[in-house]
Amino acid sequence: MPKPRRQASAAAPAEAPDLSPLDSKLGFRLRLAQQTAFDTFHRTMSPLGLTPGRLAVLLMLEANPSIRQGVLAEALRIKPSNLTVLLASLEEEGLLKRAEEEGNRRANTLQITQAGRALLKRGKVGEAEVERQLAEGMTPEEHATLITALRLLARG
Amino acid sequence: MPKPRRQASAAAPAEAPDLSPLDSKLGFRLRLAQQTAFDTFHRTMSPLGLTPGRLAVLLMLEANPSIRQGVLAEALRIKPSNLTVLLASLEEEGLLKRAEEEGNRRANTLQITQAGRALLKRGKVGEAEVERQLAEGMTPEEHATLITALRLLARG
DNA sequence: GCCTATTGTTATGGCGCATAACTAAAAGGG
DNA sequence: CCCTTTTAGTTATGCGCCATAACAATAGGC
């Protein structure tokens, strides 16, 4: 028989509060899931100096040589003003280069550098591990269903 | 026949970049989904002066009379230091009251006020609408599966 | 009565997001 | 051609949520 704590049940909901008003809310569950995802990412990637945004940029630059900043911002769904800052720090570290688009001196085209590729190679390994940890306990079908549902939710 | 833009296809990946390196990543999809959820929430709730955190507190206070701050913080998965600030603003607006726990003058117990209940009533209506919008296009089974997957992902 | 643990508060910094004001360059219309 | 409008990127600033550290007050164990 477990030893009773304070009052058995009635007055004080001290130990395990009633979470039911939030327990099945998409907003709440998304917040917790995203927080877990961020923590997991950070634990693996911070030694590499990578954040989700920084890795996303490098991945996109590898897959899209000479992509323009504005196009990249739209694809990643971040504001151009915020992308500017992100790119500046990556460029300072020599991970990418910005160049004027030929025939349009307003636009910047982006290229990943050799150093960027080297870091990206390690980043990909880490990211695979992060994804594995996040999907732990899910069947491949559940994983695919989750991705689909999230894509639907975000209308993308 | 659509009129061609610049070069037909070859050199410039300008219009629709390759998103494949991110398209099926949990981290990326979670970020977009959570952003959509936050925007949807904000659109409906900002006229009420409610943020996700503020509404969550009021919901929990209604369901858990005289809950202690620390217990609430743990349930909501926010740091006590951040909860302090959140509660201070809610108390300033008269939506809740803090009182010393009897027999333990360190601990604060929290009660929702009449004004808090009135706001909460409207908040619940808005939240139901937000949840409906987020779940749009999902069957009830898909919705339940999504919640389950998110709970699993966050280990809760 | 001391030492330690608990509970909450204050201060500060980071990260992602958003908006507004700005510069520079290109495009278009008379 | 010039002047206006549009496009592309930058800078500055504020908000929301998260995290840590330093602190104050109270409670509990020996």
Image (tube, coloured by chain):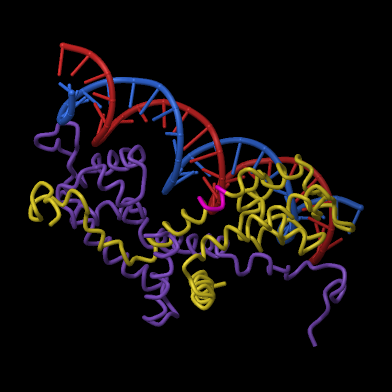
Chain colours: A yellow, B purple, C red, D blue
Residue B6: where, in percent of width, then height?
Answer: 86, 71
Residue A40 among those drawn in magenta? yes
Residue A127: where, in percent of width, then height?
Answer: 63, 57
For the stretch drawn in magenta, the main secondary structure is helix
Q: Which residues are magenta?
A: A39-43
**Image height of B156 relative to A11, above or below:** below
Residue A124 falls left or right of residue B7: left
Quarter of the view holding residue B59: bottom left
Near-viewer residue (D6 or B116): B116
Q: Quadrant of the C terminus of chain A?
A: bottom right
Residue A153 falls left or right of residue B122: right
Which residue appears at 55% of the width and 47% of the height?
A: A43
**Image height of A38 relative to D19, above or below:** below
Residue B11: where, in percent of width, then height?
Answer: 87, 68
Residue B10: where, in percent of width, then height?
Answer: 87, 73
**Image height of A85 relative to B130, above or below:** above
Task: Looking at this view, name the residue that lies furthest to the bottom.
Answer: B1
Near-viewer residue (B67 or A103): B67
Residue B24 among those drawn in magenta? no
